[in-house]
Amino acid sequence: MDNRERGFSYMSEESKLDMRMDKTSSLTAKEVVNEYKEERLARIISEYGEEKFAKKIAKNICEKRKIKEIETTGELVDIIRSSIPNKFSKDGHPAKRTFQAIRIEVNNEIEPLYKTIMNSIKALNRNGRLCVITFHSLEDRAVKRAFNDAVRTLYLSKRFTILRLRSC
């Protein structure tokens, strides 16, 4: 991820839009930015990036790509910057949340976490324990959803007690 050519950083202006963890994967950030419909792009930016200006960012991306395909991280950063009022840009880099959202979409980061938790719960022995550490609210929600779904579908409350879920 530290390699600027991979396109993960919003600090590197001329990096290609890629963001793939697995370079053999077919979906790239360039495809997400240039091919997704405005509504889908806005949903991803809102849901995965928790960005309150997601609709405006998606609209501006779609407008710019009509003129020219968006190819670099710098071009995307410029669009994002112009989409967010200055007074809201003081909480870190304005592109941080949008880049996170696109990276999560490109690498399908949330659904495998949910499935892994479900499979781990199913594999537990009686009185087994599962500890999950999350690093942001999207991961936290996926883990909580998996535990809640497991209780409903696997009737785990009869097999063992789920200790209180806590966020740090």
Image (tube, grey):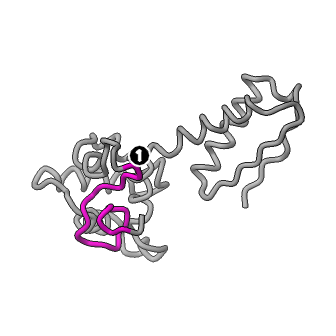
Of 102 and 128, the residue lying toward us: 128
Name the residue at 74% across, 25% down. Answer: 152
Which quadrant of the figure has residue 149? Answer: top right
Name the residue at 76% across, 48% down. Answer: 131
Image x and y of residue 109, in percent:
50, 46
Image quarter where the C terminus lies is bottom right
Q: Amino acid at mark 1?
A: Glu
Dominant secondary structure of the residues highlighted in magenta in the image = loop
Question: Farthest front residue?
Answer: 24
Q: Is-magenta flag for residue 19?
A: yes
In the image, is 122 to the left or to the right of 101? right
- Give the magenta-colored segment's residue range: 3-22
Q: How many discs appear?
A: 1
Image quarter where the N terminus lies is bottom left
Image x and y of residue 105, in percent:
41, 46
Q: Is residue 41 above or below residue 93?
A: above
In the image, is 111 to the left or to the right of 34? right
Secondary structure of the residue carrying numbered label 1: helix
Residue underneath mark 1: 105
